[in-house]
Image (cartoon, coloured by chain):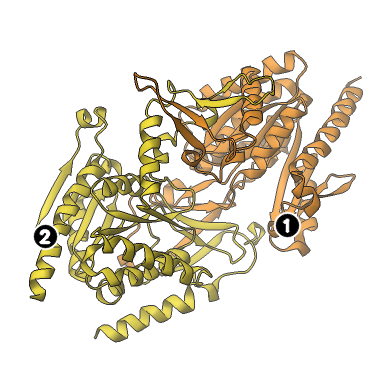
Chain colours: A yellow, B orange
Amino acid sequence: MAEPRMSSIDGKLAEEFAVPSHVQEVKEKMAAFAACHAEVGRRVVLITSGGTKVPLESRTVRFLDNFSSGRRGASSAEYFIDSGYAVIFLHRHRSLYPYTRLFSTINMLDALQLRAGDSEGAGEVVVDQQVLPNIARVLKRYNEVKDGGLLLPIEFNTLSEYLHLLKASAQALSSIGSKAMFYLAAAVSDFYIPASEMPEHKIQSSNGPLQLSMKMVPKILSPLVKDWAPQAFVTSFKLETDPTILLDRARRALDTYRHQAVVANVLDSRRGYVVVVTPESRDELVVTEGDVEKGVEIEERIVSNLTTAHNEFITQQAAGRK
Amino acid sequence: MAEPRMSSIDGKLAEEFAVPSHVQEVKEKMAAFAACHAEVGRRVVLITSGGTKVPLESRTVRFLDNFSSGRRGASSAEYFIDSGYAVIFLHRHRSLYPYTRLFSTINMLDALQLRAGDSEGAGEVVVDQQVLPNIARVLKRYNEVKDGGLLLPIEFNTLSEYLHLLKASAQALSSIGSKAMFYLAAAVSDFYIPASEMPEHKIQSSNGPLQLSMKMVPKILSPLVKDWAPQAFVTSFKLETDPTILLDRARRALDTYRHQAVVANVLDSRRGYVVVVTPESRDELVVTEGDVEKGVEIEERIVSNLTTAHNEFITQQAAGRK
């Protein structure tokens, strides 16, 4: 029964969501990245991060967005790299980025100083390390990661771009089997307006109040797990605002899609408390205020939990093949 | 007839749009800023910039947004300062910012270099001026503006914050009369969901397709021009995607609100062509591809056009009072 379901979502993807022109090029880049790292025994994680844009007009003035700074995805990327993974970072344009995220609240010009130049007037510009105390350490690490080719950034803006690029990434990573992890932290819209029902021009406010009728976005997790990357370790995220329904939704997602883990969290407490739910387990991860003062981030614990689970998963898969 | 209209919009603002807790504090800051600059004969422009967020849930996971990087507002701020104005920059959180906007496409860590430290290991971090060739000049100008106290940044996220802060700014600037200009470049939503009709929690996709019914945002330009800052020079912006209706909409806005100027532009050509429409005139401003190569921005021409008009406006107002 897998075949018709895949075709139906594939068909919808092609019909109702514009294919980005560079998708094939990106797919080849991701496949080459995965192959080269797998060859030296490195695992690869595909992280999605940030919110998707859902246009209301085809010449877009207005769009629906999902709240997400991209903080969780960006910090997780750093911890995955520290754990020996190579990272494909599929993120919303201008959302938070690994390493630079640490300075996102500072206007860079406030952290720079002009040093008087020589007779030719060529002054130097230096970073004021009182303003950015960690800059040297972070820059060093950033350059190591860049030189090691450990981080492949890919950008999306719209839901359409996200869906097609995620599909391409799953296909690109299928060649490395269980060595691939998907860490789907992006805030993806559940609703959209099909291209065929979208007005071309800006909706005029003189026409009166706005009635919007939005369709359900196809559940891409289903073909991803079943068809595109069936051997990979897949983690999805569940964000709710109502804590009473959270675990039920997480379990239901696992039952429906049959993937490996759901990271469940509540909007208000997402930086201090998450539950990693798998078919066999339920791990509560907490960082206290004391931890936060010491600079501990909950993403470090999430990544540690999942890389351990990924280890076991790879071992089991290998045993299963014998 | 002005009184009931003002009361009605004021009432709506208070009832249906949450008042930000810091609005009074910001208002006092803006009033002090305006007074201190007016005292030394400097004009003050209030620039709004970036798009407004319209939440769909009170614990917000989803929101409606208006496309805007904040580029026009941020660059205009620089040209107004160059023209002798002090600028209140009311902008969307994380939208483009004056001066830093020039480096917005570059990852700052790609532009920094670590210089080997002395024996104590305290290395310097310097800017690679091959990557950021203009950094010294821009930083110098940024510091002059900061030291001169010429730029007062105020942030908003939601439509509610925008509306209340704009009202506060108009009241704060009313004391300097015709020396104040409003340059309303923000992309403000025409539609919203009243607090009373908003669900508290995240809308569940399991409930099926989404029907949204959005009300019209009250036209705040009306009380701004009539009641809150009746002596100021007010410029609004009109962005359309359909060029055939643009000028008609611009004229209609002038007829309705009786303010001083509308900057009319079409989404696709907004960086190369705008029309400044006033009750008496229609100025087409163009930058060619050749201009762009020389680094000319259309905002320089818009600001030049409007500061000239503001001059005349002040002279007329003064003559009218005699």
Task: Quadrant for the C terminus of chain A, please.
Answer: bottom left
Residue B74 picture location, percent across and down: 64, 38
Looking at the rendered structure, the number of numbered marks drawn on it comes to 2
- Pointer 1 chain: B
- Pointer 2 chain: A
> On the image, numbered disc 1 is attached to which residue?
B269
* Residue A190 placement: quadrant: bottom left
Farthest residue, direction front: B119
Picture residue at 56% right of the left edge, 42% below the top = B104
Is B240 placed left or right of B104 in the picture? right
* Residue A61 sits above or below residue A5 on the image: above
Could you tell me the amino acid type at mark 1? Answer: Ser
* Residue A67 sits above or below residue A296 on the image: below
Report, in whole angstroms, how far the alpha carbon at label 1 lies from the one at label 2: 55 Å
Q: Nearer the viewer, residue B134 or B160?
A: B134
Residue A125 picture location, percent across and down: 56, 27
Could you tell me the amino acid type at mark 2? Answer: Glu
Picture residue at 9% right of the left edge, 66% below the top = A316
Q: Residues within 10 Å of mark 1 (few under 14, many from 20)?
A: few
Viewer can see residue B251? no
Residue B218 picture location, percent across and down: 60, 46
Picture residue at 43% right of the left edge, 75% below the top = A13
Viewer can see residue A117? yes
> On the image, numbered disc 2 is attached to which residue?
A312
Q: Say whether marks 1 and 2 touch (CB < 8 Å).
A: no
Q: Nearer the viewer, mark 1 or mark 2?
A: 2
